[in-house]
Image (spheres, rainbow, N blue to C red):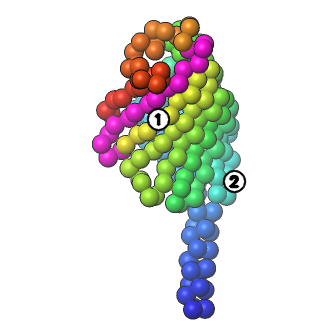
Amino acid sequence: MKKIALFLFYSLFFLAMLLFFTPKENLYYFAEEQLKPLGIVIGYEEVIDHGFSLEIKDAKLYVQKIKSANIASTTIHFFGLYNTITIKNIILDSTFEQFFPPLINHVTLHESIFSPQKIVAEAIGDFGEAHATVNLLDRNISVIVKPSKLMRSRYRNTLRQLKKTKEGDYRYESKF
C-alpha cells in the first residue's frame, strides 16, 4: 500500500512540475503565429509566466488589420485536467459601437479533459450576460444572451439578428 501511495505521489508531483515548467510564453507566441493566417493579430501585450498560469496585460486585438479591441488583462490557467481563460475589461473599438456596447467586463472560458470536444464560455458586459457552448466535434456554436436594458433599447437591430426564446432571452447558433 505504501508503494502505491508513493507511486501516486511521485506521478502527481511529476505532472505538477511538468505543468509548472512548461514554456507557456513560447506556447502563447506559437498560438499567436497560428492565428496570423486567419487575420487575427494580438499586439503590444506584456506576457508574464506565473508558474501554473500565464498573464497577458494590455493587449490590442486586430482582425483583418482593423483594430478591434483593447484587452486589459487575460489570465490563462493550465491545470491539465481543467483549463480556464479569464479575460477582463475588453473595450471594443468605436467602429463597433453602432452594433454592440463597447465594454465587456468579464469573459471566462472553460475546457475540461473529461469533455475535450466542448468549450464553455460566460460573458458579462454592458450588453448583459451571455452563455456560449462551442462543440469542436460538431463544429457548432450556441450562444444565449440575456440582454441588458441598454442592449434592448439602443441595439435593437443587433437583437433582431438573433432568435428570441420563450424565456425572453436571445439565441444564436451557427456552424463553423
Whether 107 is drawn above or below 28: the answer is above
Determine which of the numbered discs, if any, sits on residue 144 in the image. none
List the single residue furthest toward the front: 166
Q: Nearer the viewer, residue 69 or 112?
A: 112
SS at badge 2: loop
Percent position of residue 19, x then y: 58, 63
Using the rendered image of the protein, determine whether residue 159 is visible from the camera's viewpoint: yes
Amino acid tagged 2: His
- Residue under numbered circle 2: 50
Q: Residue at x 57, y 32 (%)?
A: 123
Percent position of residue 98, x then y: 53, 8
- Residue under numbered circle 1: 132
Q: Quadrant of residue 7?
A: bottom right
Question: Are the residues at dot 1 and dot 2 in contact (C-beta closer than 8 Å)?
Answer: no
Residue 31 lies in the magenta-colored region? no
Left-right relation of 127 to 136: right
Left-right relation of 3 to 161: right
- Quarter of the image with the C terminus in it: top left
